[in-house]
């Protein structure tokens, strides 16, 4: 009876494969490195709005207040910053593809 209490069949247990976790961790680290590199090459104000909104998860109102922006200025700045980020990311991918 005691043994049944502590021993159970492993039919529905998913044992994680450490190699998959390691590969995932390396992938995430590389991805973060690329994101940081791209953000670092952006104009400071664009980088600030993206980091505050997407990384720090600050509200639109908080960002507007701290950066002295109107809601329209925030929307336009965030849109421009996202576009810049995408363009820089595409350039980086093209360079990586050509180098490979």
Image (tube, rainbow, N blue to C red):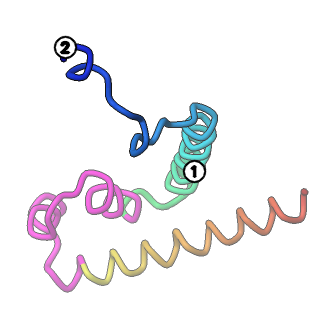
**Left or right: where 62 falls relative to 24:** left
Q: Which residue is mark 2?
A: 2
Q: Which residue is mark 1?
A: 31
Q: Confirm whether the magenta stretch covers residue 67.
A: yes
List x then y, in percent, for residue 7.
31, 22
The secondary element bearing badge 1 is classed as helix
The overriding secondary structure of the stretch rendered in magenta is: helix
Q: Quadrant of the C terminus?
A: bottom right
- Labels in figure, total: 2
**Left or right: where 100 falls relative to 46:** right
**Left or right: where 66 falls relative to 17:** left
Residue displayed at 25% across by 51% down:
56
Q: Quadrant of the N terminus?
A: top left
Please determine whether, in this image, residue 96 is positioned above or below residue 19. Answer: below
Comparing 30 with 50, the one in front is: 30
Query: In whole angstroms, how far apart are the C-alphas of marks 2 and 1?
Result: 49 Å
The secondary element bearing badge 2 is classed as helix
List x then y, in percent, for residue 83.
49, 78
Q: Which residues are magenta?
A: 46-74
Q: Confirm whether the magenta stretch covers residue 78.
A: no
Please determine whether, in this image, residue 46 is positioned above or below residue 3. Answer: below
Question: Which of the 4 image quadrants contains residue 11?
Answer: top left
Comparing 27 with 100, the one in front is: 27
Circle 2 Cα neighbour tier, 10 Å, few/some/many (<14 / 14–19 / ≥20): few
**Left or right: where 79 falls relative to 15:** left
Report the residue that reaches farthest toward the front: 1
List x then y, in percent, for residue 54.
31, 61
Residue displayed at 23% across by 76% down:
74
Residue displayed at 26% across by 62% down:
53
Circle 1 Cα neighbour tier, 10 Å, few/some/many (<14 / 14–19 / ≥20): few
Residue displayed at 17% across by 72% down:
69
Question: Which of the 4 image quadrants contains residue 66?
Answer: bottom left
């Amino acid at each position: 009876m005691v043994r049944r209490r502590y021993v159970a069949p492993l039919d529905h247990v998913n044992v994680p494969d450490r190699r998959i976790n390691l590969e995932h961790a390396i992938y995430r680290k590389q991805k973060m490195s690329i994101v940081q590199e791209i953000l670092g090459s952006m104009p400071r104000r664009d980088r600030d709005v993206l980091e505050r909104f997407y990384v720090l998860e600050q509200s639109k109102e908080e960002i507007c207040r701290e950066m002295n922006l109107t809601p329209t200025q925030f929307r336009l700045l965030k849109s421009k910053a996202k576009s810049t980020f995408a363009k820089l990311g595409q350039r980086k991918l093209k360079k990586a593809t050509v180098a490979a």
